[in-house]
Every structure is written in structure tokens, then in C-alpha cells.
Image (tube, rainbow, N blue to C red):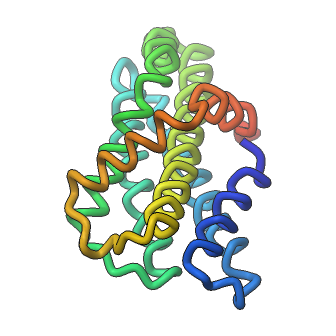
Amino acid sequence: MSDRHILHAAEKLVHALNKTLDENLPAEIAEIVKIHSAGAAAAGVAAGWIPGAGGLAAVGISAGFIWSMYGRINAKIGLPLTENVVKSLGTGIATNLAAYFVGGLITSTVFSLLPGIGSVGASVVVGGTSYALTLASGYVYLKLLANIFLSGNDPTRMDVDSFKRAAENVVASENMKTVIDDAKSSYTPPKK
């Protein structure tokens, strides 16, 4: 997923908030998504070295980066959602997207059981998976918030189930395979 897609989603959110006076805000929001995606990738690379379980560990690690990313986005736009709502929403979105990553997690598990080069391969796969999952989760969250604000709803008055249904609608309305594929292709593995 190109920086342009994330920036466009951030611009749409800022427009929905009527905060267009701050022309730097969309770029700052997009940067939050990119920083957390890079952090999840680095943690995923490290987790990929765990034989057999690195892929699953990386999913849990990615969830932490997603929760933190959502919290930082909310702080940046002045949206006071509770930690419970943010964690539930982050977990729900990541779970909805996880089906797109099953193949990568199976591949990383098989690779990680091979000594040496297998561990290297597993770490690259897991790093890319963590990056793409976090980036796609950020994209979905930006679209979700924009949709909520554009529909005239107040997110501070929504319960967790309403957020999850709205997130499922975003996932259903987007071509998530393309979003995920773009996110995966934008990942650059770390050099030795």
C-alpha cells in the first residue's frame, strides 16, 4: 500500500472532522500509521526466529502495535475513546483481516523449523506479515472513523459492537485483497 493511500485516507478523515485548517494533520496521521507498521515489522522479524510459534507470536505483537496506533490517532484528532473500546476494535479489525495472512503464517511456521536459512526466511515472512497487517488495520481505522464522522454519528457515544459492525462494513466495502497485497508489496525487509 503506497503512502498515497494512507495519506488519502487520513485526508478524508480530517475533512470529515472539519479540521482542514491544519494542513499538516493528514500527514501526521499517516506518519503514525507508518511508524507503527514499521515497529510491528521489526518485532515480527524478531518473532520470526522463534521456531514453530513465531508467526502466532507476531500476530499478538502486531495487536499491541495496532492498539497503540489507534490510541495515538485518537489523541491526534482529539477523540477520547476508552482503552477498552480501542483494544476491542483493534482486535476485531485485526481478526477480520487475519484470514488474508493465514498462508504467510503457515509458510513462516514451516520455514522456522528449518535451521539457518529457514529462520531467515521465516523472519522475513513474519516481518512482512506484521507490517501489512498493521498498515491495513490503520487504513481500515482511518476509513472507519471518516465514515462515522461523515454519517453524523458521535463515536464517543458508540458501543463496542456498533464500532465492530461499522468496521466490518468498511472491510466488506473495500477490496481488502488489494489493500493487503499493496501493503505486502510496500514492505522492505531489513538488511543484514
Residue 69 visible within the image:
no
Q: Quadrant of residue 41?
A: top right
- Residue at image position (52%, 37%) is 173
Quadrant containing the N terminus is top right
Place of residue 160 in the rendered image (x, y in percent of width and height, measured from the top left): 22, 57
Place of residue 51 in the rendered image (x, y in percent of width and height, measured from the top left): 39, 21
Residue at the extreme bottom: 21
Count of marks, rendered view:
0
- Residue at image position (54%, 59%) is 142
Image-based side of 119 in relation to 124, left or right: left
Q: Say if 82 sits above or below 111 in the image.
A: below
Image-based side of 107 in relation to 28, left or right: left
Image-based side of 192 in relation to 122, left or right: right
As rendered, which of 27 and 44 lies closer to the eye?
27
- Residue at image position (45%, 85%) is 78
Place of residue 70 in the rendered image (x, y in percent of width and height, measured from the top left): 43, 64
Image-based side of 164 in relation to 10, left or right: left
As rendered, which of 152 and 38 lies closer to the eye?
152
Q: Say if 107 sits above or below 95 in the image.
A: above
Q: Quadrant of residue 118?
A: top right
